[in-house]
Image (tube, rainbow, N blue to C red):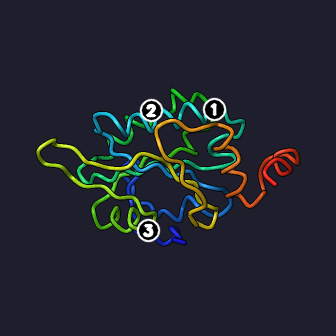
Amino acid sequence: QPMLGDTPAAVESGAPVRLGTYFGSKPVILALAYYECPMLCTLVLNGLASALKVVSFDAGKEFEVVTVSFNPADTPALAAAKKQTYLKEYGRAGAAAGWHFLTGDAAAIEPLTRAVGFHYKWVPEQRQFAHAAGIMVLTPQGKLARYFYGVEFSPRDLRFGLIEAAQNKIGSRVDQLLLF
């Protein structure tokens, strides 16, 4: 299983960060999406925001969300605009500190996408990337715990995925029993 804590630096709000910054005490939802995607990435992020609005846990409190563009041409300004869009959609206080939108160069992006098994390819004729749709949940230690494929995500399954990834450190006793 890949460990992402030592993955090379990316950029958030123009400042370099290591992915390990987001790991340690909470599970992480990882979304790989490029910010000028004409369709699929927006659908994935919309589906994620929609599911997160129903989940009782809060980004930044019980878990982190890390969205990384796999397009090295995406800029911190594009990432900041996307962040504002999705923070408004999510609508939870304190989420700005818990939902991160990152950019990076190919040297930072490729090891991350390879580590989680995310494949994509630039299609010049269409002037866009061909890629899979989904999100990943990682443990606080940066190990891949679960994939959620598609563009819509069950809030119940996402909640249980976070509980599992947190190694049963979040959620109620009822959640633990249901998960068992």
Q: What's the CA distance linking mark 1 and mark 2?
A: 13 Å
The local crowd at label 2, few if under 14, some if 14 to 19, many if 20 or more residues have their Cα within 10 Å, is few
Amino acid type at circle 2 is Gln
- Location of mark 3 (residue): 115
Marks 2 and 1: in contact by CB < 8 Å? no
Q: Is residue 108 above or below residue 63?
A: below
**Quadrant of residue 174 within the rendered picture:** top right
Counting from the top left corner in percent of width and height, residue 141 is at: 62, 67
Looking at the rendered structure, the secondary structure element under dot 1 is: loop
Counting residues from the N terminus, which is met first, the one under dot 3 or under dot 2?
A: 2
> Quadrant location of the N terminus?
bottom right
> Quadrant location of the C terminus?
bottom right
Of 156 and 170, which appears nearest the observer?
156
Of 14 and 45, which appears nearest the observer?
45
Q: Residue at x 32, y 50 (%)?
A: 131
- Location of mark 1 (residue): 93
Counting residues from the N terminus, which is met first, the one under dot 1 or under dot 3?
A: 1
Looking at the rendered structure, the secondary structure element under dot 2 is: helix
